[in-house]
Amino acid sequence: MGLALGPAIGFQSLMTYTPDFSFETAATKRGYSRVAGVDEVGRGPLAGPVVAAAVWLDPDNIPDGMNDSKKLTAKRREALYDQILAVADVSIASCSVEEIDEINILQASLRAMERAVAGLKIHADYVLVDGNKIPAAFGVNAEAIVKGDARSLSISAASIVAKTWRDRLMVDLAQQYPGYGWEKNAGYGTKLHMEGLAKFGVTPHHRCSFKPIHNML
């Protein structure tokens, strides 16, 4: 028994997921009629807002090839972004750097998710949330799913939409503030970004509560 336990645990930790519609279907069977997925991107960067997307998918019209946005190429994400917006109810929301600095990045991430779900054209009566924390506004009509962007198609769609939208925003900001490499690093603290900070200083889009920026100030 003990010999079998170790390999089983190792197998679980190495397990790869493929997103499906099982969480959505299970919620529908419990009586919910409008099940949406929500995910956020941009917790870790030193610059830019944290962005969330909420997506309700039509069970009869789900784009093929969706997965955790980090596992897809930028080209594939761009194509899926357009497909998702064409067939789904989608809402995108964010929390600004000022809000991040005021309430901390975790609370800002939860707030962005609340805003995204509230912005759906038709109210979602059940929400699948990526991660292990449920925003207070969702109450009991929600479910936290660890690695949800790789397990639930609705959360995968939200992950793709949020990342694509935020990456585009950072490309736009990079044109206004060149030298930090935001068009490549999306605001994360890469070598190029840190060199830009040393050379050009802190911009209004930097998160002053984050240690590297706070230390510079």
Image (cartoon, rainbow, N blue to C red):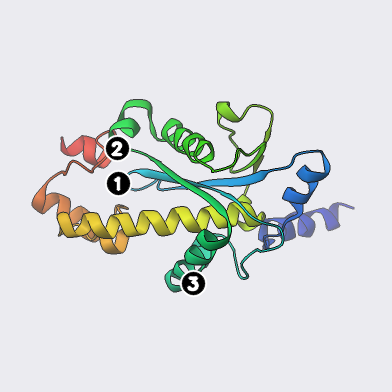
What residue is disc 3 on? 76
Closer to the chain start, of discs 3 and 2, is 3
Dot 2, crowdedness within 10 Å: few (<14), some or many (≥20)? many
What percent of the width, then of the height, locates residue 15?
69, 61
- Residues under labels 1 and 3: Cα distance? 23 Å
Closer to the chain start, of discs 1 and 3, is 1
Q: Residue 13, labelled with which disc?
A: none
- Residue 28 position (above or below residue 138): below
Left or right placement of residue 68 versus residue 162 in this view: right
* Residue found 53% across the figure and 62% down from its top: 86
Pointer 2 and pointer 1: residues touching (CB < 8 Å)?
Answer: yes
Specify the amino acid type for callout 3.
Arg
Secondary structure of the residue carrying numbered label 3:
helix
Secondary structure of the residue carrying numbered label 1:
loop
* Residue found 67% across the figure and 60% down from its top: 19
What residue is disc 1 on? 48
Left or right placement of residue 75 versus residue 217 in this view: right
Q: Residue 97, labelled with which disc?
A: 2
What percent of the width, then of the height, locates residue 52?
46, 45
